[in-house]
Amino acid sequence: MPKKKQSKTKESRIKIEPPKGRPMLYWVGKKPLEYVKGFPAKLKPHEVFDPLNTGLRHEPPIFKNLEKDWQNLLFHGDNKEVLATLLENGFRGKVDLIYIDPPFMSGADYIRKVELRGIKQTQTMVDDASLLQQTMYFDIWKNDAYLQFMYERLILLRELLSNDGVFYLHCDDNAEHHLRMLMDEVFGPENFLNWIAYRTDVSRGRKKESKFFGNNLNMLFIYTKDKQEANKRFNPVAEENEIKDPLAEGYLEDKGRFFSTSDPGTYTEESLYHLAEEGRLFITKGGKFKIDKKKRRVIIKGGSPRVKYYLIRKGNKFFKERIIDNVWEDLLGIANQPGEATGFATQKVEGLLERVIRSSSKENDLVLDCFIGSGTTAVAAQNHGRRWIGCDINKGAIQTTSKRLQKIILDQIKEKKDVPSYSFGIYQVNDYDLKLLRTEAIELAIEHIGIERRKTDSFFDGTLGKELVKIIDFNHPLTLLDLQLLEDEIKKRPDEERNIVLVCLGKELVADPWIEEWNKKHPVNKVRVIELRTDKKYGKFLLHQPAMVKVKIERKGNKAIIDVLDFNSPTIIERL
């Protein structure tokens, strides 16, 4: 096989504008975010949903290319790395609406069971071969770690938001006071637009016995980068409720129309003049009014002024319009919408995201959710003719989102609905699915780090000085499951006093907090990690260079015969 010269992918450093909002929140270990590293976004094989066969393939997903032929984007990876990649690829200031529903710092571990495609081919050890318990958010984080986690992501999201864009942050009472201060710091308190009180449920079961009232409330904080410009974007949202018998319900009749009245409250004299011209001024019994057009005012004699509110007529039916304010009690949580449930503990109802999207964006706007979870934001965006970007580190979330979107898009094609795109691509950021044979990967890592191989140990791969070494398979980052397997193994060795080194390619968010807690509780068997891309001493082990293959495809009857003529992996060659 001829050896081809390969150019190394340069790491990019993206400068981040520091927050200027005051007051500022401080915590132990607070670090400014001045630069972030961009990572290539690799289009996953066979992961473009393109039912109309347009042939769209954006790799990498550069904004100026997507602007000409838009395709929605779904990223699998750590959202900090994904957001950095979007900045590098020209998305700075291009996002019109951001909604995030981050972990709530609630002290809970959200677990769901998901059926993953191809799970039988993985080496994951689980009780049920077809089911994997995935921790959605491992909330053992200390307050300081959580605040740093959110601070960095809020800064990156601000960079992506357009000047007139709108940002919704969904949270509960566990972290709302901290997050509100973080948002003030990142966006500036002058750019706070409003907050939504969202009723998630009604008190029932054990909640009826709650001390100091049952908790059924979430909060949504709304911010922007330019309040004046963002206000132009707002679309008032109203609800219509049918009134079966207007007269029986106390409405007054006026030439076949029905209306109710209310006190004018803070209406000015000029406002009353305009209401009178519109036929919406009502004077109580015994009174009358006259319009003075010269002085643009209303002269009222006797009675009291009131404002008319007419019912909306549609055919022979009448409806009352209610303008939605910042108290949302009509969109109860997923427990009240069983038809939408996907199994995600943190799933939000479609109606909630539909209201956010309808009120704060227009058709063809770009919507971003970097905690996509079950995909509800992307679902609502697709349904309402918006472009969208979704991201999650959880593979089950990506598959669930993809499945939901495929069904919606196929229905839209049947209905000939006009939307920005009927397709989406799934991208891998920071290549966690690197396809190396396990034995080859272990040998390469051993040589690179200087590990002494021990083939007699069924669990550990060798030693580094006086430490035991475990190499995590390179087709996935270090996960909670890997750490639990390590804990189980240590329990089987009560006399083992050596510390442990874990060698991995990427880490899930839960890894560092778990290791920190473990090391506090164990004077021996302390754990440290060598991450082969970022470690100061052993980093740069693997480069972002995809393998290349030359094949010959021949059709025989109803079968396709594929001959691999040449295969070239720059990653493997670099290690030889």
Image (spheres, rainbow, N blue to C red):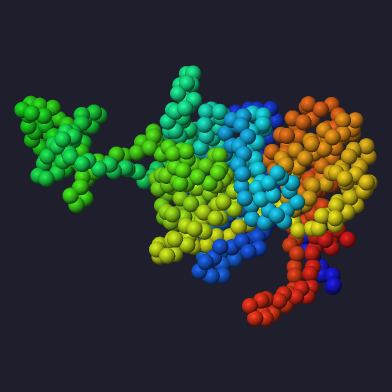
Quick check: can you spot residue 87? no
Q: Is residue 265 above or below residue 566?
A: above
Q: Is residue 70 above or below residue 12?
A: below
Pick out the residue farthest to the front: 128
Tell me which residue sits at (87%, 45%) in the image.
458
Pick out the residue farthest to the top: 211
Q: Nearer the viewer, residue 490 or 254?
A: 490
Residue 27: x and y in percent read 65, 27
Q: Quadrant of the N terminus?
A: bottom right
> Which image quadrant for residue 483?
top right
Q: Nearer the viewer, residue 133 or 11?
A: 133
Tell me which residue sits at (68%, 46%) in the image.
128
Q: Is residue 377 above or below residue 281?
A: below
Tell me which residue sits at (8%, 33%) in the image.
289
383 lies left or right of 5: left
Tell me which residue sits at (74%, 30%) in the image.
517
Quick check: can you spot residue 427? yes
Q: Nearer the viewer, residue 570 or 507?
A: 507
Residue 39: x and y in percent read 69, 53
Residue 323: x and y in percent read 31, 39
445 lies left or right of 16: right
Q: Nearer the viewer, residue 416 or 109?
A: 109
271 lies left or right of 326: left
Residue 489: x and y in percent read 82, 38
